[in-house]
Image (tube, rainbow, N blue to C red):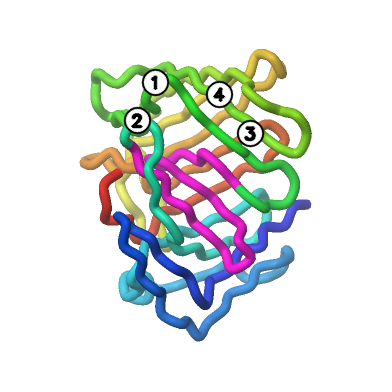
């Protein structure tokens, strides 16, 4: 059983569009170290009152944690990488809803994801011209796991509903089948998209082989360019 140490940070520095803003000193430090701890739970009012973007995240069958945005940085193909960070400097980095890097999680971590072509998630899966197939490369640690070629295929599963912080939202559900031929390994990622904007509302992904699934619900959106 893996444990995902996720904290509601008492002090973070938010770097957005080149501007650094000191986050307010938060009275509540939410430590989620072991199974049996309660899931993080905040009201819509509390989440919207915070001056920064936020997510819920869960690793495997561990407790759900609440993470706030620490940094937004340029990524390939004119995208923006969002770094969600805990007080222990554990990081989940996402681009257009896809996990592209993790740091200091227990066990395996995704060190890098890159591609010569834009991610269909970034192009918009609801756009009829977006390709359903994609090729990318991943590095993961520990060990010498570098430059593994991966191929993925997206499939629109149709209209669905998904609960985001207890509120049911209409969604379009996609599944992505990822194959890493060199490892004879296949896994499936799931995405629930907003029907109008196409942005990811919730996702369950296996960032790399030997990693537990990471579930993310996007609570308060980052307002910069993505």
Q: Residues within 10 Å of mark 3 (few under 14, many from 20)?
A: many
Q: Which comes sooner in the sequence, label 1 or label 3?
A: 1
Helix, strand or loop: magenta stretch: strand
The stretch in magenta equals 79-102
In screen coordinates, is 116 left or right of 179? left
Q: How crowded is mark 4: few (under 14 residues within 10 Å), some or many (20 or more)?
A: some
Q: Label 4, on which residue?
A: 137
Q: How far apart are marks 2 and 1 (CA)?
A: 8 Å
Residue 87 in the magenta stretch? The answer is: yes
The answer to whether marks 2 and 1 mark residues whose Cβ atoms lie closer than 8 Å is yes
User: Which residue is rendered at x = 36% and y = 66% of the image?
Assistant: 20
Q: How crowded is mark 2: few (under 14 residues within 10 Å), some or many (20 or more)?
A: few
Q: Which comes sooner in the sequence, label 3 or label 2?
A: 2
Q: Distance between the residues labelled 1 and 3?
A: 19 Å
Q: Which mark is residue 77?
A: 2
Q: Label 1, on which residue?
A: 117
Q: Give the image quarter of residue 13.
A: bottom left
The answer to whether marks 1 and 3 mark residues whose Cβ atoms lie closer than 8 Å is no
Q: Under tag 2, what secondary structure?
A: loop
Q: Distance between the residues labelled 3 and 2?
A: 22 Å
In screen coordinates, is 1 left or right of 163? right
Q: In this view, does 158 lie above or below 61?
A: above
Q: Residue 169 carries which label?
A: none
Q: Under tag 3, what secondary structure?
A: loop
Q: Label 3, on which residue?
A: 208
Q: Which comes sooner in the sequence, label 2 or label 1?
A: 2
Residue 41 in the magenta stretch? The answer is: no
């Amino acid at each position: 059983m893996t444990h995902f140490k996720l904290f509601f940070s008492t002090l973070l520095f938010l770097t957005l569009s080149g501007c650094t803003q000191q986050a307010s000193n938060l009275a509540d430090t939410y430590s989620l170290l072991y199974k049996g701890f309660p899931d993080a739970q905040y009201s819509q009012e509390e989440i919207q009152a915070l001056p920064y973007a936020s997510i819920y995240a869960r690793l495997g069958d561990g407790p759900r944690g609440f993470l706030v945005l620490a940094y937004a940085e340029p990524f390939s193909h004119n995208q923006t990488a969002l770094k969600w960070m805990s007080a222990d400097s554990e990081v989940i980095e996402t681009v257009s809803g896809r996990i592209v890097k993790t740091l200091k999680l227990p066990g395996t971590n995704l060190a890098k994801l890159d591609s010569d072509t834009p991610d269909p998630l970034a192009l918009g899966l609801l756009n009829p011209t977006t390709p359903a197939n994609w090729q990318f490369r991943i590095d993961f640690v520990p060990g010498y796991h570098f430059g593994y070629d991966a191929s993925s295929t997206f499939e629109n599963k149709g209209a669905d509903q998904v609960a985001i912080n207890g509120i049911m939202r209409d969604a379009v559900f996609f599944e992505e089948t990822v194959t890493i031929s060199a490892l004879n390994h296949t896994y499936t990622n799931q995405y629930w998209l907003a029907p109008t904007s196409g942005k990811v509302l919730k996702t369950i992904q296996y960032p790399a082989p030997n990693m537990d699934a990471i579930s993310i619900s996007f609570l308060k959106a980052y307002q910069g360019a993505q």
